[in-house]
Image (tube, rainbow, N blue to C red):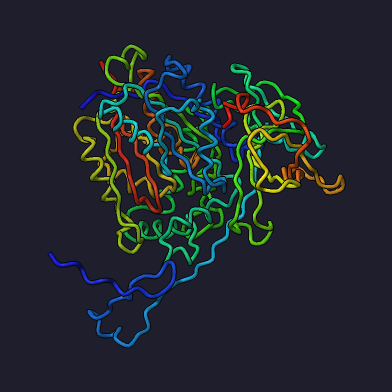
Amino acid sequence: MRDVAIIATAQTKHVRAATALNEVEMIQPVIQDVIERSGVDRHGFDFTCSGSSDYLAGQPFSFVMTLDAVAAWPPISESHVEMDGAWALYEAWVKIQTGHADTALVYSYGKSSPGDLPRVLSRMLDPYYEAPLWLTSIDVGALQARAMIDAGLTSEAAMADIAHRSRTAAGVNNPHAQLTSSAEPSALLAEEYLADPLRRHDCAPVTDGGVAVVLAAGDRARELCDRPAWIRGIDHRADGHHLNFRDLTTSPSTTLAASRAGVADRPVEIAELHACFTHQEPILRTALGLGDDVEVNPSGGPLAANPMMAAGLLRLVEVADRIHTGEVSRGVAHATGGHALQHNLVAVLEGEG
Amino acid sequence: MSEPAPIDLPPGLWSQPAVDTSAVAELADVEAVQMVRNPARLDYDYTPGIATTRFLRAIKEKRLVGERCGETGKVYIPPRGVSPVSGLPTTEQVELGLDGTMVSYCVVNLDFTGNAQEIPYVSALILVDGSDIPIYGLVREIPYQDVRVGLRLKSVWVEPEEMTTSLENIRWWAPNGEADLPASELTDHV
């Protein structure tokens, strides 16, 4: 296997609605920023890969228009996934493993504000049995949260604590976050339900934003970056699509991906988890085998900023940033796609020395 | 090796083979579901962005405004705010002409539009004077067999009271009477 590292990152200030900007105007400054930070020539990337979804902005082939920001004419080697950017990074990592690239530019973005996001996400359900019910992402999250509470694996009080901890951490650590403060858990629990047993604080916000990453292999990474964040393991696995095929209180695909990525090989200092609901954090902690000493979502995680299609790649970025600064030496990043943690990617990032 | 038996398909473009329910006794006399219809509708508030908003505001005043790439000098219309060649924000608004040149066309003989257009009609790529990338438009007021690359065109607009912030302000394009532009001047666009 080739050594591949995240050598530069950039992200937007995440907001509820970037109303003045179209998608390319929103993501171009981030791409320009990451390119300048990386030290790679603007036209010098061996591969470019992006993640986004037409369903968010409601525009067919919206990703093609966004390619303007990577100077895609004359033609470049380029690909796109209709998935979170973590999977665009995975594709770029595979491309580098094949030897066809030494550097790659990866970016993803989501403008959820033009539509009604929980209803838009209902279109991910199977088209015959579940989608006609118009279960929103919040409804599905509530089913999962209820299963967790009934199984004694979490409680509304524990969920409020997670919301409070995450948004408070964002206020301290994350200048890019959308939500950076929280009422006390006791006050959160006095709020009305959004979808029983979920209250507003249990749900990730609707966010417009984006993120970009530069990957480089081996000596090229060492030459471009003082302390590269090496991808020591990366794997993604999926559980069944139908909700009734699954035990919603567990995430077997996360456990398998974590095993293949080598999470347990050495101690983990921090974990950035793509948990869009408070109750998903204990599912993922268990699935990843994280001890109580592991700091989870120091950035605030998706509960503090949730740009669709970017929030998973952001997890890798938040770990990589802390490796770049020398703050930590080994961290785990998790990204998810689909409803109720259906498809999961796990990456282990390490610094040298 | 014998050829597999041909599958008996019911008529229709998207027909499927009959469902085999022989393994489930309870389904013996049940009529198979051939189709489900699940209407779905999602509403969006479209955000044109800063550069395209400038373009749309201008078109309401019967002006075509492109934006220039500071690195290559190319002018894009409708502008999206970023140059696809440099990857950098466009830096300057450029007032374009209201005439253009046909750089490619298609004589359409299929009714895509639900009778909105009488067929055959001509759909063309038109390079607006002063710009570097063509836009789509209808071409009329000329027999379809006479259209050609290089044909000079004028834009035909809706009545002033019908003007909105939309490219549909241009009803169609029609010959402006000028001599054709030689193909050698259009090599970047054909």
Left or right, A273 with reference to B144: left
Outermost residue toward the front? B146
| Point 40% across, 24% down: residue | A214
| Quarter of the rendering containing residue A152 | bottom left
Residue closest to the eye, A102 or B153: B153
Numbered label tally: 0
- Judge by depth and name the residue closer to the eye, A24 or A195: A24
Residue A278 located left or right of residue B71: left
Q: Which residue lies furthest to the bottom in this view?
A: B29
Residue B25 drawn above or below residue B9: below
Residue sitting nearer the eye, A148 or A102: A102
Q: In this view, does A183 lie above or below A119?
A: above
Give me the residue at 74% from left, 30% from top. Answer: B179
How far across and how far down the image is residue A132, in percent? 48, 66
Q: Which of A312 and A61 is in front in this view?
A: A61
Counting from the top left corner in percent of width and height, residue B85 is at: 54, 23
Q: Position of residue A19 (x, y in %)?
A: 65, 39
The residue drawn where x is 21% and y is 40% is: A259
- Residue B50 can be seen in this image: no
Q: Find the residue positioned furthest to the right.
A: B161
Q: Quadrant of the N terminus of chain A?
A: top left
Residue A62 shows in this picture: yes
| Rendering coords of residue B49 (x, y %) | 65, 36
Q: In the image, B63: left or right of A104? A: right
The image quadrant of residue A94 is top left
Quarter residue A240 falls in: bottom left
Work out which quarter of the rendered image holds the C terminus of chain A and state it: top left
